[in-house]
Image: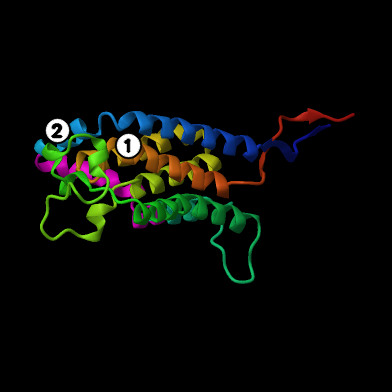
Amino acid sequence: MTVTRHVPVARRQIGAFQVSLLAAATALVAAGGAAFCIDLPVAAWFKANRVPGEIGRLVNLLEISGHSLGAAVVLIAVVTLDRTLRFPMPGRFGAGERAFTKMIAATYLGGLLADVIKVSIERVRPRAADLAGVASWLGTFGDASLAVEKPHAADLMSFPSGHSAVAAGLAAALTWRYPHGWPLFAMLAAATATQRVVTSAHYPSDVACGAAVGLIGAACCLGGQRLMRRALAPETVA
C-alpha cells in the first residue's frame, strides 16, 4: 500500500550558519579597514551633493530595517504570518517561542554592542564635521573636527553604525529562519547602510564595521538546531 508520512528529514546545522556569519563579519571588518582610505572623499561628496526632493525622501525610507522600531514591525509581521513562531508569554516557552526569542535577540544584540562602542570611541559624524579641515581619517576621531557650535551627544557617535548593526542582525535572523530569502534580506541591510552614508550620518567604514558587529551579535544568538520538516514522497510498504 501507499503511505505518505511527515518525518524529520533534515537538520539545519546552525553551527555552520554561525560560522558563515562570523566569516561574513570578518570580511566586513576587512572592508571597513580598507574603507578608512575613502571615508573623507565619500563623506565630503555626499555632504556637498544632497539628494534632492522625492529621491531624498525615498532614500530615507531605506533606513527602516535598521531602525529599532522598523525592525520591531518586521518581527511582529513575521510572528503574525509564520504560524510556527510564537511570541513568548509567561508560562509558555515552547519551540516556537524559543525560535522567535532567538530572532529578537539576534536582531538587537549587535545594535546594543555598537552603542557600547559608540560611547567608548568618539568620532564626529560627517554632517557635524569640518571635513575640509581634516588632514586624514584619523582626524575624524575625537572632537577636534567638530564644526557645530552646540553639538549633540550623537554628533560624536559615528563609529560604528548602530543602524547597520540592527539591519545586519535582522537580515541574519530572517536568513536563519527563511534561508531561501537571503538575497532580499542582504539587499535590505545594504540599503540601510547606503542610506546612512548618503545622508551624512556615517562614513563607509562606520557602516561596514557596524554590519560586522550586527553579524557577530546574531552569531552569538542563533545557536542550537532548528528541525526542518517536509512531506516525503509516497513510498510503497509491503
> Distance of mark 2 from mark 1, alpha carbons?
15 Å
Q: Position of residue 132 (x, y in %)?
A: 11, 37
Question: Which stretch appears magenta?
Answer: 52-72
Left or right of 139 in this view: 98 = right
| Mark 2 or 1, nearer chain start | 2
- Whether 127 is drawn above or below 238: the answer is below
Q: Position of residue 89 (x, y in %)?
A: 57, 68
- In this rendering, does residue 85 appear at all? no
Tell me the crowding category of disc 1: few under 14, some 14 to 19, or many 20 or more residues within 10 angstroms, Cα based.
Answer: many
- Residue 45 badge: 2
Q: Quadrant of the N terminus?
A: top right
Amino acid beneath label 1: Ser
Residue 40 occupies which quadrant of the picture?
A: top left
121 and 228: which is toward the camera: 121
Residue shown at 23% from the left, 43% from the top: 140
Left or right of 102 in this view: 108 = left
Confirm whether the magenta stretch covers residue 190: no
- Whether 2 is drawn above or below 146: the answer is above
Q: Which residue is mark 1?
A: 205
